[in-house]
Image (spheres, rainbow, N blue to C red):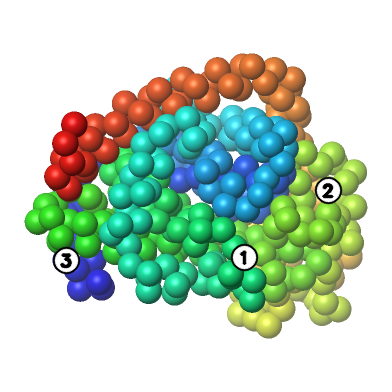
């Protein structure tokens, strides 16, 4: 589909610029979620472009979730969005399952996407592994639902981490095939936006693995609910190597743990990696880690405190999600209705 995608990509000029992205409420919010996603969402909101941000709870249940934990994590993630600076008056903020159009368009796209496309998804291979016969059908079809999440709003831009880029490319393939099959120019070609120094934050215990809320070791990640002492302790114990920090980015090659900590510092300080290394090149980690700890606590503690305050009133969080869902449906319902009309469905 690459030629079709290339041809279609010029047509986004006819669509309202709109950003869509989402995070799964499948565990506690981590520094990786903040730097790789939420911080960038807040920056997009400030750009003045229309922004839609989602708690993608339908994606979360592609693997089993404890019901009470899912409710709590949905609210906690919403609190994280709000505490970090997402303003419900400027952006649409909602949870996916309250907008039924996501599931309906997801099914329609299941009938557009090809099995071969889905089988090539590297996240499917990674998550299912040798146990693919016991994985849920939802996990296999996850990228098709993600395409529906994006195209349901005619989103033109999707801030994602490197690991989700392939899914946005699949979204473009689905949009291109739908447009081609029905002879329309209805869906845009959304562009993945991978920006910033820490779009993929790695484990503090293993620089070759992504920081994950599902990692059995709590020391592998910084949780957005961690207090100052816990953050400092985890950074102090983070895996490093015995060499001094280099003065330029090239010196971080083949040093994954060093690169990860420098990337985190750069993202938190809103500096480039080169700027950071110009300041800290030649320092040992015994000097750099306290600097990183102080910066992380200064940036994250206010967010953690505000999250805790918001979580004291779950009814208010639910109210805000409900309002966001109503606004999301105002955009989604007409697009789904027109999709069904194009397909030939009655009513």
Q: Which residue is mark 2?
A: 231
Q: Assess whether mark 1 and mark 3 are in contact (beta carbons under 8 angstroms).
A: no
Q: Secondary structure at mark 2?
A: helix
Looking at marks 3 and 1 on the same chain, the residue that comes earlier in the sequence is marked by 3
Q: Is residue 91 left or right of residue 213?
A: left
Q: Secondary structure at mark 1?
A: helix
Look at the picture and state if 87 lies above or below 174.
above
Q: Which residue is mark 1?
A: 134
> Residue 19 at x, y = what percent?
38, 43
Looking at marks 3 and 2 on the same chain, the residue that comes earlier in the sequence is marked by 3
Q: CA distance from mark 3 to mark 1?
A: 39 Å
Q: Is residue 300 left or right of residue 100?
A: right
Identified at 72% across, 41% down, the residue is 66
Q: CA distance from mark 2 to mark 1?
A: 37 Å
Looking at marks 2 and 1 on the same chain, the residue that comes earlier in the sequence is marked by 1
Q: Assess whether mark 2 and mark 3 are in contact (beta carbons under 8 angstroms).
A: no
Identified at 69% across, 17% down, the residue is 313
User: Which part of the image, by quadrant, shows the N terminus?
Assistant: bottom left
> Residue 75 at x, y = what percent?
64, 30
Residue 16 figure quarter: top left
Q: Pick the residue in front: 296 or 133.
A: 133
Q: Which residue is mark 3?
A: 7
Q: Residue furthest bottom?
A: 254
């Amino acid at each position: 589909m690459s030629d079709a995608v290339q041809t279609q990509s010029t047509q986004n000029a006819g669509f309202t610029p709109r950003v869509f992205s989402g995070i799964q409420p499948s565990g506690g919010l981590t520094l990786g979620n903040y730097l790789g996603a939420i911080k960038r969402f807040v920056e997009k909101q400030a750009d003045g472009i229309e922004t839609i941000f989602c708690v993608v709870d339908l994606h979360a249940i592609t693997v089993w979730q404890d019901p009470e934990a899912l409710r709590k994590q949905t609210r906690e993630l919403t609190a994280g969005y709000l505490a970090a600076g997402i303003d419900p008056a400027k952006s649409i903020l909602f949870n996916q399952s309250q907008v039924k159009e996501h599931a309906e368009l997801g099914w329609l796209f299941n009938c557009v996407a090809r099995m071969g496309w889905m089988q090539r998804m590297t996240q499917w291979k990674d998550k299912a592994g040798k146990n693919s016969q016991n994985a849920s059908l939802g996990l296999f079809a996850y990228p098709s639902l993600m395409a529906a999440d994006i195209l349901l709003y005619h989103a033109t831009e999707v801030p994602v981490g490197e690991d989700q880029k392939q899914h946005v490319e699949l979204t473009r393939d689905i949009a291109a095939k739908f447009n081609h099959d029905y002879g329309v120019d209805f869906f845009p070609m959304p562009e993945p936006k991978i920006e910033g120094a820490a779009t993929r934050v790695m484990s503090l215990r293993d620089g070759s693995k992504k920081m994950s809320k599902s990692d059995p070791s709590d020391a592998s990640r910084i949780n957005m609910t961690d207090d100052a002492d816990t953050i400092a302790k985890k950074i102090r114990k983070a895996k490093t190597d015995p060499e001094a920090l280099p003065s330029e980015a090239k010196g971080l090659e083949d040093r994954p743990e060093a690169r990860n900590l420098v990337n985190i510092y750069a993202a938190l300080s809103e500096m480039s990696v080169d700027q950071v290394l110009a300041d800290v090149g030649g320092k040992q980690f015994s000097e750099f880690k306290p600097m990183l700890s102080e910066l992380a606590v200064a940036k994250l503690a206010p967010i953690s405190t505000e999250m805790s305050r918001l979580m004291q009133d779950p009814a208010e969080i639910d109210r805000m999600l409900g309002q966001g869902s109503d606004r999301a449906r105002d955009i989604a319902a007409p697009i789904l209705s027109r999709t069904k009309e194009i397909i030939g469905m009655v009513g």
